[in-house]
Image (spheres, rainbow, N blue to C red):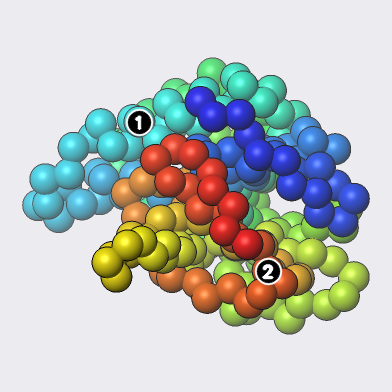
Amino acid sequence: MQAPVSYKLLKQQLWLSAHRCVFWEEEKALIVSDLHFGKTGHFRKSGIAVPQAVYKEDLQRLVHLLQYFQPRQLIVVGDLFHSHQNKELELFQRWRHDFPDLPVHLIKGNHDILHDNWYRQCNIHVADNELQIGGFRFRHDMDAAAPDTEAYFFSGHIHPGIRIKGAAKQSLSFPCFYFARQFCVLPAFSRFTGIALVRPESEENVFAIVNDHIVQLQ
């Protein structure tokens, strides 16, 4: 895979991966958002023929990232799961048993509606609204927060994307990391998601994910 891209933020070393995650070096934390595990099974249950390989690929990609970065903790900024329990979540339970000593922190997103007992059985530490570690705060939806000057937020929810213009008035849209002055919006980890285009201001930083490579736009 492409080597992670270095990004300094508030004197902290972050590494941006084209596989849609951030590694926070000082805390040895892998940060992801919007995995939507179980979504393909939810669609199949509704009669829409989405192959299970889509979900298995996302789960295997997460395993690869854990092996690559060797984090001490996994921070999920919401929407770890997509909906009610289905057979695909049994695969997640087996995955969890393969990493029993890895602390997993979940900041609940709007799709995280499983029963509390299910999270406990999977040894997932759940924060209902927000988690703070050092100078970073993690919240699924920034619309529900009031940023202050004392902390920097990481969020997800909107599945940010950026449009890149080419020749002859052509353009393509790609998922991205969006770093604003007081918050970062992470790309959706799941590839089975849409994107919402962001319009960054001049002092903000955007890293597009293009064909499994990171391209800094500003």
Tell me: 8 left or right of 157. Answer: right
> Which residue is at a point 18% across and 37% down the rendered structure image?
51
Residue under label 2, please give it: 204
Camera-nearest residue between 164 and 125: 164
Q: Is residue 214 visible?
A: yes
| Screen quadrant of the C terminus | bottom right
Q: Is residue 100 above or below residue 89?
A: above
> Dot 2, how many residues are within 10 Å of its Cα: few (below 14), some (14-19), or many (20+)?
some
> Which residue is at a point 14% across and 55% down the rendered structure image?
46
Nearest to N terminus: mark 1 or mark 2: 1
> Which residue is at a point 51% across and 25% down the rendered structure image?
1
> Dot 1, how many residues are within 10 Å of its Cα: few (below 14), some (14-19), or many (20+)?
few
Residue under label 1, please give it: 57
Q: Quadrant of residue 25?
A: top right
**What's the distance in space between the residues labelled 1 and 2, CA to CA?**
32 Å
Camera-nearest residue between 198 and 34: 198
Q: Secondary structure at mark 2?
A: loop
